[in-house]
Image (cartoon, grey):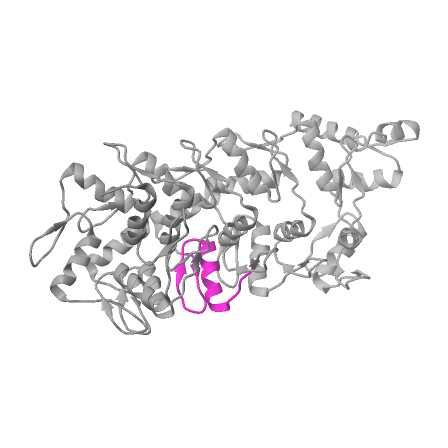
Amino acid sequence: MQEMASSSLQTNKILFPKRKQRTQAGTSYNCPQCGKSHKYKSKLDSHMKIHSEEHLYTCPHCGKSFRLKSYLEVHMRIHSGERPFTCPQCGKSFKHKHHLEKHKRIHTEERPYTCPQCGKSFKHQQNLVVHIKIHTEEHLYKCPQCGKSFTRKSSLQGHMRIHTGERPYSCPQCGKSFTQKSSLEVHMRIHTEECPYTCPQCEKRFNHKHNFEAHVRTHTGEQPYSCPQCEKSFKHKHNFEAHVRTHTGERPYTCPQCEKSFNHKHNFEAHVRIHTGERPYSCPQCGKSFNHKHNFEAHVRIHTGERPYACPQCEKSFKHKHNFEAHFRTHTGERPYICPQCEKSFKHKQNLVVHMRTHTGEQPYSCPQCGKSFKHKQNLVVHMRTHTGERPYACPQCGKSFNHKYNFEAHVRTHTEERPYTCPQCGKSFKHKQSLGVHVRIHTLEHPYSCLQCGKEFVQKSNLEAHMRIHTGKNSYTCPQCEKNFMQKSNLKTHMRIHTGVCPYTCPQCDKSFKHKHHLERHTRIHTGERPYTCPQCEKSFKHKHHLERHTRTHTGERT
C-alpha cells in the first residue's frame, strides 16, 4: 500500500509540478483526521462528510443518499433519462458535462493533456496518467499466477481471464462471449451494421478503428512501425511484431495438445482447429463452412464476384491478395524468395518451398492406396485419379475427357489452333508452355538436367529419364500385344499405332492422315511451299532437314 502511495505521488509530481508551491504560497485548510489539505474552506467542509458519513441528500425513487446536492442531481438523471448536455455538431446527448467535453474532442481533434517529459498529447487525462507510468516505470498491478505486471487495474483484470477462461461479456443476439467489453462493443456492430469510422479521402466505412487507421495508410503510405534491427518498416503493428520474432526466434503460441509452437497468433488459432474440427466461418448463401477466415472471405467473392485487389499499373483485378502480389511482381521483376542452398530466386513463396525439396529429397504427399509419394500435392491429386478413374475435364467440342487440367487445355487448342506461348527471341509460338520452356533453351544453350552417373546433360527432364534407363537397363513400357519394350512412354504410344492403325495427324487441306506428327509437318510443306532449312553458306533452302545435311557436304567435301 505504501509502495502504491509513493508511486502515485511520483506520478502527481510529474503531472502537477506546481501544485505543491500553490498550497504553500496561499492559506491551506487541513483535515484534522487525515491531514489532506484544501485551498478552499468549502472543499474542506465537503471533504469532512466522508469521515462523518453524513448523507443529507436522499433519492426519492431508490433511497440512495449522497453527501452533495450536485451528486443527487446527477443521479436523478438515471431515473428521468434526462441527457441535458448536447453536442452542437452531431446532436448526440450526454448525462454528464465532462462526457460531452470528451466527446467534442472527436470533432475538434483537441488533445489538451500533454506529457511534460516526451511531449506526447492525449484527449483524456486518464490516458496521460497511464502514459506517465512509462517514464516512472510504474507497474502497480501484478498477476499472481504468471508474474506479469500492468500499469492499469483494468488491464490486469482482462489478463486474469486468460488464466480463468472467464468470458463475462455476452452478445444478446447470438450469444457469443468475450473477455473484454470493448470486444463485445465492436462485435455488436456486425448486428447493427454500424460503421462509425469513415475515410475522409474515399469515404469507405469501417466498424473497427484499427482497420480504419490501417486503411488510411494506403492513402498516406505511412509505415509507422520500424524494426530496430533491420530498419524494415510496416503499416500494421501485428506485422511488425511478427517480423521482430524472425530476429528473436520467439514462438509464443504453443498448442496445448501437440506442443507445436507458432510466432503468429492466427496461425496458432487455425492449427488448434485441426484438433477441435471447428469450422467457425459459414457462408450465408450456400452454408459451406471454413476454419480460416481468409478462405471464407475468398469463397464469398465467388457469390459476389468482388475483385478488391486492383493492379495500379495495368488495372487487372484479383479476388485474392496473394494473387495480386504475385501479379505485381511481373511488373517489378522482384523475386523475393531465395533458396539458401543454390541462391535460385522465386516470385512465389510456395515455389521456393517446392524447390527446396529438390535439395532435401522430401516427398510429403503419399498415395493411401499404393504408397507412391510426390513432392507436389497437385501431383498426388492427379495420381489418385488413376485409382478412381475420375476424368473431370471434358472437351465441350468432342467430349473427350482428361484427368489433368493441363492436358485438357492443351487438347482444346487442337480445335482452336491457339498458340499462346511465344518465344521473345525468335517469335516462334507454341500451344504448350512446357514446349516454349524447352525451346528457349535452344537460345540460352541451357541443359539443366544432368546424368549423375556419366555427366551427360539434357534439355528436357524426360530425355534424362530415358537416358537413365541405359544405365539401369530398365525398360518400363511394354506393348501388351507384341511385348516389345520401350524406354519412353511416347515411343510405346507411337508403336501402338502399328497395331491399331490409328493415324491421328490429319492434313487440313487434303485430309491425308499420318501416324507421326513430324510426317504431317513435312507433308504440309507441299501445300505451303515452306523451306525452313537454310544453308548458312549459300542461303539455299530446303523442305527437309536431311536434304540440307546432304547439300552441306558439297561445301565441306565430306563423303559418307
Residue 104, position as x, y percentages in the image: 79, 54
- In the image, residue 399 above or below residue 353: below
- Residue visible at 41% across and 49% down? 538
- Residue visible at 23% across and 58% down? 385
- Residue visible at 30% across and 56% down? 544
- Asked if the magenta segment contains residue 2, the reply would be no
Left or right of 258 on screen, residue 60 = right
Residue 83, position as x, y percentages in the image: 76, 62
- The quadrant the N terminus occupies is top right
Seen as rendered, the residue at the extreme left is 482
Residue closer to the observer: 254 or 319: 319
Q: How many numbered callouts?
A: 0
Left or right of 339 on screen, residue 190 = right
Left or right of 203 on screen, residue 174 = left
Task: Please identify the quarter of the rendering in which residue 194 is found.
Answer: bottom right
Left or right of 485 on screen, residue 403 = right
Whether residue 374 is visible, yes or no, is no
Residue 162, position as x, y percentages in the image: 48, 41
Whether residue 132 is visible, yes or no, is yes
Residue closer to the observer: 440 or 340: 440
Residue closer to the observer: 214 or 436: 436
Seen as rendered, the residue at the extreme right is 26
- Asked if the magenta segment contains residue 296, the reply would be yes
- The quadrant the C terminus occupies is top left
Task: Please identify the quarter of the rendering in which residue 5 is found.
Answer: top right
Residue closer to the observer: 26 or 342: 342
Task: Please identify the quarter of the rendering in which residue 387 is found.
Answer: bottom left
- Which portion, as a residue range, is magenta? 280-308
Residue 437, position as x, y percentages in the image: 39, 49
- In the image, residue 199 above or below residue 50: below
